[in-house]
Image (tube, rainbow, N blue to C red):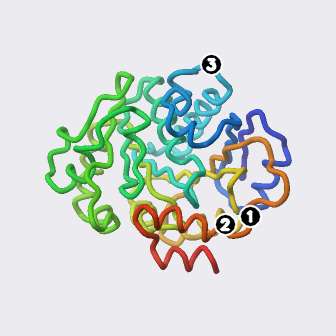
Amino acid sequence: MIYFDVLHCETDVAAHMRRLISVGGGYSTLLLPWNRMKQDEEQSDPENALVSLYHPKSPASEAYRMLRTNVHFSGGGEAIQVLEVTSSFPGEGKSLTAANLAITFAQAGDSVLLVDADMRRPTVHEKFQLPQTPGLSEAIVTGKYDDSMQDGPLDGLKIMASGTIPPNPSELLHSDRMKDFLDEMKSRVDLVILDVPPVLVVADALALAPRADGVLLVVSLINSDKNGTKRSVEALRGVNARVLGTVVRGIVPPRGKYGRKGYYNDYYYYYDSGYGADESAKETATK
């Protein structure tokens, strides 16, 4: 059964997502309110980015708590211990969602490790105002996990930044050492949240998805492209990932059509400027 948890949004937005992705079996869509601020300001200002920490009574914080509840009960009797948070393209709010979700779980008393597995454009350390190194790359290579963990702003919340950017992040994330790391973390904390790169730009999200107990796909109604969202779900299913649902950011439907001319090329330029997009991902997105 498809179900939607809608907060401060028009019902036609949920209906749009229902038409966009025809799925069943506990698939949910949670819609987060849009705060109308410039995205770069939201990303760079910790107080704006970490709304669940600094503005716990806001509608957005309530939406994140609702998302926490959905994730908690989405296991079907089995605990979600490793959660991947991704998007189709950059700029849809995956990192904000991962960070705020980690905060809400910690506020509820869970032990949480938030891992910045976006080794191409890492931002978690900036949001929490922490050093970027040591981090995930050092933890995987050396096996010294504790040395790469940092205390978060709440009891029970640990942060692992990206660490030093490796030459080929996909290989590192797909390695047996990454599997060993996740297995060890599952024995230490209640929940590991992985902030990973967008699905249709590089292969990292698909490499990690089968090792997660569930995947959340973040979609921005302001910037999103309907075909990209659909192809992301198909790509995740293609690697046998368990897609728990979508998190839709932006309750105000944009004027005109979703997306815009040159959408794909613009986003590839964004990621190419940082580290280069996978050709296979480009082909998947533009088919």
- Residue type highlighted by circle 2: Tyr
Q: Position of residue 155 (x, y in %)?
A: 35, 22
Q: In what element is the residue under mark 2?
A: helix
Q: Nearer the viewer, mark 1 or mark 3?
A: 1
Q: Identify residue for label 3.
A: 57
Q: Is residue 278 left or right of residue 136?
A: right
Quadrant housing residue 126: top left
Please report the residue visible at 36 percent of the width from the left and 30 percent of the height from the top.
157
- Residue type highlighted by circle 3: Lys
Residues at marks 1 and 2 touching, judged by CB atoms closer than 8 Å = yes
Q: Identify residue for label 1.
A: 260
Q: In what element is the residue under mark 3?
A: loop
Q: From the image, which quarter does the C terminus lie in?
A: bottom right
Answer with mark 3 or mark 2, whichever residue precedes in sequence.
3
Foreground of the two, 120 or 40 = 40
Q: Is residue 234 left or right of residue 281?
A: right
Answer with mark 1 or mark 3, whichever residue precedes in sequence.
3
Per the rendering, the mark at residue 263 is 2
Please report the residue visible at 36 percent of the width from the left and 45 percent of the height from the top.
115
Give me the C-alpha separation between circle 3 and circle 2. Answer: 35 Å
Classify 238 as above or below 66: below
Quadrant housing residue 210: bottom left
Residues at marks 1 and 3 touching, judged by CB atoms closer than 8 Å = no
Classify 204 as above or below 154: below
